[in-house]
Amino acid sequence: MPKLFFSLFVAALISSCASQPEAPLLNNLTGDALLATTARVDPLLPADVLLLGEQHDALEHQQIHKQVIALLAQRNMLSAVALEMADAGATTAGLHPSSTEAQTRSALKWNDTAWPWEAYGPAVMTAVRAGVPVMGANLPGEQMRQQMQDSALDGQLPGPALKAQQQLIRIGHCNLLPESQITPMTRIQIAKDISMANALVKVVLPGKVVVLLSGSGHTDRLLGVPQHLPASLKVKAVRLRAGPATEGDKAEAFDAVWQTPALPDKDYCAEFKKQMGG
């Protein structure tokens, strides 16, 4: 082959290879993890949207995130993963399956102080390795002040649900917030739920599942993200519960409650009071 033709052939071959999408690098489940995850997920299928509501300091919940994502990915059923842990607008959609963790964190504008990467990184990277986009879904911080003042958000929930959400804000802040702050803080919670719902709707694909990873308050059917999703979508809401079930784990709020071992007792209110300056 003449040297010129050989050079053109090599250049064309390189160009062709570069244009090919990179193959997924699946982290397949096997053994007991596969059996346990299948037993959890299969009763909830089919679904367009699967909401996994965790307790943020329960490491086993983040391990379950990874397992669910791996199972759906190896079945080619995972359309996308949305995160409370990153702001809406951030996405890994432009990354290749072999992208590094540093590249992934940069794409998601990851805040390691608020959300430790060592806890959430394994689930995120499982999706990236499978060639599945991961996207931020939370309300960006710079929008919070505006949303606190938006009275239109008060009408986004039915009256009883709004009152229940306000009460959860009180209890969740250990009854230490001034009453004047309850309505603005509730508006932020509702705005976050709307932001997550909007992110999910954008990536729904027929025959596949988009997964949301968030705190369990956002997955509550009566109060959270499901209130702001189209009725036409098949939505399944899961609460991951560390320890025994409680009155809040009612069937109308969650399609399933996945229990994990209880965590050591911790006085969250003492910590919060300290943050509030005593």
Image (cartoon, grey):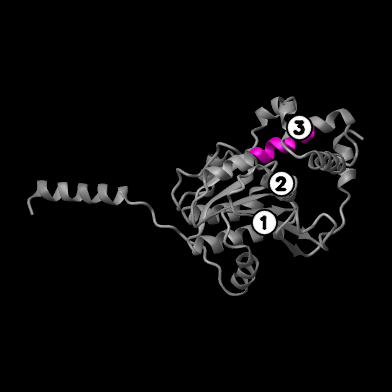
Q: Quadrant of the N terminus?
A: bottom left
Residue closest to the far right: 278
Residue wearing tag 3: 154
| Dot 3: element | helix
Residue at position x 71%, y 46% in the image: 218
Residue closest to the far bottom: 31
What secondary structure is the stretch in magenta mostly built from?
helix
| Dot 1: element | helix
Q: Residues within 10 Å of mark 3 (few under 14, many from 20)?
A: some
Residue wearing tag 2: 218
Residue at position x 56%, y 44% in the image: 201
Residue closest to the far left: 2
Along the polypeptide, which appears first: circle 2 or circle 3? 3
Q: Residues within 10 Å of mark 2 (few under 14, many from 20)?
A: many
Instruction: Tell me residue 104's x, y (percent).
Output: 53, 45
Along the polypeptide, which appears first: circle 1 or circle 2? 1
| Dot 2: element | helix
Q: How far is disc 1 from disc 2 in space, using C-alphas?
A: 16 Å
Residue at position x 76%, y 40% in the image: 158
Asked whether 166 or 242 is in front, the reply is 166
Q: Which mark is residue 62?
A: 1
Q: Tell whether 53 sits left or right of 109.
A: right
Magenta residue span? 185-194
Instruction: Tell me residue 157's x, y (percent).
Output: 74, 39
Report the amino acid beneath label 1: Gln
